[in-house]
Amino acid sequence: MRDAINKAARLVINHCLKYGIGRIVFGWNKRQKDSINIGAKNNQKFVQIPTTKLKERIIQLCELYGIEFIETEESYTSQASFLDDDFLPNKA
């Protein structure tokens, strides 16, 4: 699993370097895996994805390459529309 995390993080960083992207905004919801209901087998597979490790690896690589990393809480993003200029509440 570590190899997959490293490859995924490297893919993100390489994309940023290739296109001159200097900032990554990472949507994060600490409780994203709680009470998920996408079917028993899918629940089991999804909960096993080490999203925290991926986030930590991306942060490490951002520091190494001088890319700004911004973590944003996103549990309420589905209640707002970018196209309508809606305000995104921060209810953390």
Image (cartoon, rainbow, N blue to C red):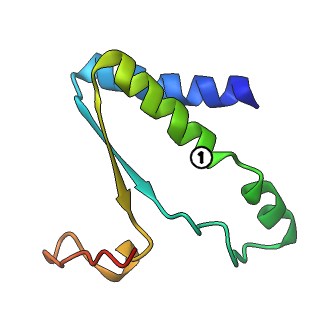
Direction from residue 2 to residue 83 in the image, left or right: left
* Depth check, front residue: 84 or 27: 27
Residue 40 x/y as whole percent: 86, 71
Q: Quadrant of the N terminus?
A: top right
- Is 87 drawn above or below residue 57 in the view shown? below
| Crowding near the residue tagged with mark 1, few <14, some 14–19, many ≥20 C-alpha atoms within 10 Å | few
Q: Which residue lies furthest to the right in this view?
A: 41
Instruction: State which quadrant residue 32 falls in.
Output: bottom right
Q: Quadrant of the C terminus?
A: bottom left
Direction from residue 16 to residue 44 in the image, left or right: right
Q: Which residue lies furthest to the bottom in this view?
A: 79
Q: Which residue is found at the position 83% from the left and 61% from the top? A: 44
Residue 72 x/y as whole percent: 35, 57
- Is 20 drawn above or below residue 78 in the view shown? above
Q: Which residue is found at the position 36% from the left and 72% from the top? A: 77
Tag count: 1
- Is 68 drawn above or below residue 72 in the view shown? above
Name the residue beneath numbered marker 1: 52
Instruction: State which quadrant residue 23 falls in.
Output: top left
* Depth check, front residue: 26 or 84: 26
| Secondary element at image label 1 | helix
Q: Which residue is found at the position 37% from the left and 26% from the top? A: 62
Residue 71 x/y as whole percent: 36, 51
Q: Which residue is found at the position 21% from the left and 22% from the top? A: 20
- Is 72 drawn above or below residue 91 in the view shown? above
Amino acid identity at mark 1: Thr
Direction from residue 36 to residue 64 in the image, left or right: left
Direction from residue 76 to residue 53 in the image, left or right: right
